[in-house]
Image (spheres, helix red, strand yellow):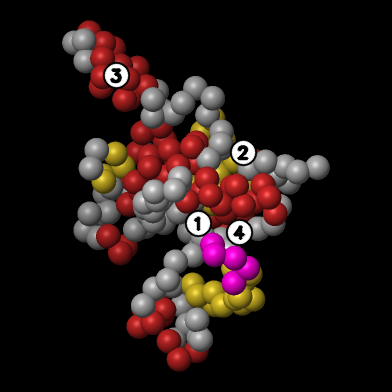
Amino acid sequence: MNKKIRKAVFPVAGLGTRFLPATKANPKEMLPVVDKPLIQYAAEEAVAAGIDVLIFITGRSKRSIPDHFDKAYELEVELKAHKKDSMLALVQEIVPPQVTCVYIRQAEALGLGHAVLCARHVVGDEPFAVILADDLISSDSGGCLSQMVDIYNQRQSGLIGVQQVPREDVHSYGIVEGESVDERLWKINSMEEKPKPEETSS
């Protein structure tokens, strides 16, 4: 039986040191891009891909993330009283009614893999997506996650989204090597975290 991806894990417990000093008091996921924080773009992408359970792995000093997705009764009353209907709609639409948000506190920052593992009791044995909110991807052909979910539904196998980086920057990224299956899909043969440029051929 084919299972659909209904859950997405958002590891948001990191310290955001690459964005200091902007992230000293504010989570990097809450940094604004135009009129919305990064994390909201990520949540919207998940919902557009058919996901209805958003699992946030948070840490110390990340209160603003659950606060952002929570209902803001006082703000809504204020906007309604001043007839600011368009703003009220924006606030009420942050989390669509069919979507559930779950928050899990990662007691200790032990890396990305551990953050994802913290979601195991909510995810169970279902397929799920992992979304890194600090990587904003623009696409003209539907969201990146929607495309990945479509491929998952056809193939029922694990997927990872990758992009090319300049050779001199490979030491800053996880690097994959593989072979082309079609125009958009590669079979990964190996993966290495932050290799030296001379240690990888891809």
Identify residue for label 2: 6
Q: In the current view of this chain or complex, which residue is farthest to the front?
A: 183
> Can residue 61 be seen in the rendering of this structure?
no
Residue contact between numbered discs 2 and 1, judged by CB atoms under 8 Å: no
Residue contact between numbered discs 4 and 3, judged by CB atoms under 8 Å: no
142 or 37: which is nearer to us?
142
Where is residue 159? Give x, y as percent: 61, 59
The picture quadrant where one finds residue 164 is: bottom left
Looking at the rendered image, the disc whose residue lies closer to the viewer, 4 or 2, is: 4
Identify residue for label 1: 108
Label 2 – label 1 distance at C-alpha: 27 Å
Label 4 – label 3 distance at C-alpha: 38 Å
Query: Vertical placement of 95 versus 185: above or below?
Result: above
Looking at the rendered image, the disc whose residue lies closer to the viewer, 1 or 4, is: 4
Give the amino acid at mark 3. Answer: Leu
Q: Looking at the rendered structure, which numbered label has been put on residue 88?
A: 3
Give the amino acid at mark 1. Answer: Glu
Give the left or right position of residue 179, taking residue 71 as reference. right
Label 4 – label 2 distance at C-alpha: 15 Å
User: Which of pointers 1 and 4 lies earlier in the amino acid sequence?
Assistant: 1
- Magenta segment: 180-184
Identify residue for label 4: 159
Q: In the current view of this chain or complex, which residue is farthest to the right?
A: 1
